Amino acid sequence: MAWRSSGASNQALIENLAANGLITQPRVKQAMLAVDRAHYAPRNPYQDSPQPLGHRATISAPHMHAAALESLLPYLHPGAKVLDIGSGSGYLTHVLAELVKPGGRVVGVEHIQALVEMGRVNVGKSAEGRGLLEMGVVGFVKGDGRVGVEEEEGGKGWDAIHVGAAAVKGGEGRLVGLLKAPGRLFIPVEEEDYAQHIYVIDKVADGSVTRKKDMGVQYVPLTDAPTE
């Protein structure tokens, strides 16, 4: 049903995603309505398909952003700390911030400085986004998404981690170590046959880890910055 969800405006896109059952949670719908994709996608912002950003990066299709938000939602409460690896355009970083304010923080991680700046500039295109940047609810850093970034406030770990690029099988273990207990990781993983699937990985209160293999996907890989 995703291909039927495109719209002529941000509101139409989100309403169509909800009508097609791709958004089911009111909090997710409200957060996505609050962030205009036109500030983040260089063309066709309201089409339900991935869009190129340059630097070998893409902004994911809206239905994939909705899937990630709905999966992580139990951990996206006011005050939560969230890591958004492969933040790209900054779109999902901003939507995540809508779900953890007040008191929360979302940090977008990119391996190319130009993408770090792109995210920061895009969030600043709206008054609401500028406020989130000024209050420190949203931030962007350059780093290697394969190893992640330590949660800086108290070192207790991240409540939720979203990864917007595919990890090699087994590589997700480094990111699990950055989660709080309880906490959740949403990550595409490339397996031995080169197929990719979303894995939803939970660290429960006693520190043990559970893994759920979810939908098949196709993401760009987590990798080194391009040399060209």
Image (cartoon, grey):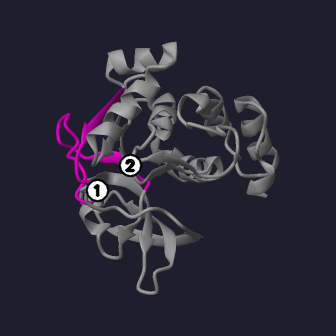
Is residue 125 visible in the rendered structure shown here? Answer: yes
Q: As drawn, is 156 to the left or to the right of 34?
A: left
- Badge 1 amino acid: Pro
Q: Which corner quadrant holds the C terminus?
A: bottom left
Position of the N terminus by quadrant: bottom right
Query: Which residue occupies 47% across, 32% down?
Result: 94
Q: Which mark is residue 39?
A: none
The answer to which of marks 1 and 2 sits earlier in the sequence is: 2
Q: Which residues are magenta?
A: 138-164
Secondary structure of the residue carrying tag 2 is loop
**Residue 55, numbered circle:** 2
* Residue type marked 2: His
Q: Nearer the viewer, residue 171 or 78?
A: 171
Tally of numbered discs: 2
In the rendered view, does 171 fall on the left or right side of 189?
Answer: left
220 or 162, nearer to the observer: 220
Check if residue 123 falls in the magenta segment: no
Task: Say few, some or many: other residues with alpha carbon within 10 Å of mark 1 (under 14 / 14 to 19 / 20 or more).
Answer: few
Q: Secondary structure at mark 1?
A: loop
Estimate the spatial distance between the alpha carbons at disc 1 and disc 2, rounded to whole Å. Answer: 8 Å
Which residue sits at x=48%, y=44%? 53
When asked about the image quadrant of residue 189, the answer is bottom left
The residue identified by callout 1 is: 226
Measured from the top left, where is residue 196 in percent x and y? Answer: 49, 73
Residue 173 found in image quarter: bottom left
Q: Are marks 1 and 2 in contact (CB under 8 Å)?
A: yes
Quadrant assignment, res 79: top left
Q: Position of residue 158 (x, y in %)?
A: 31, 46
Q: Residue at x 45, y 31 (%)?
A: 97
- Magenta-colored stretch includes residue 150: yes
Q: Looking at the image, which residue sits at the far bottom?
A: 193
The reply to whether residue 105 is in sight is no
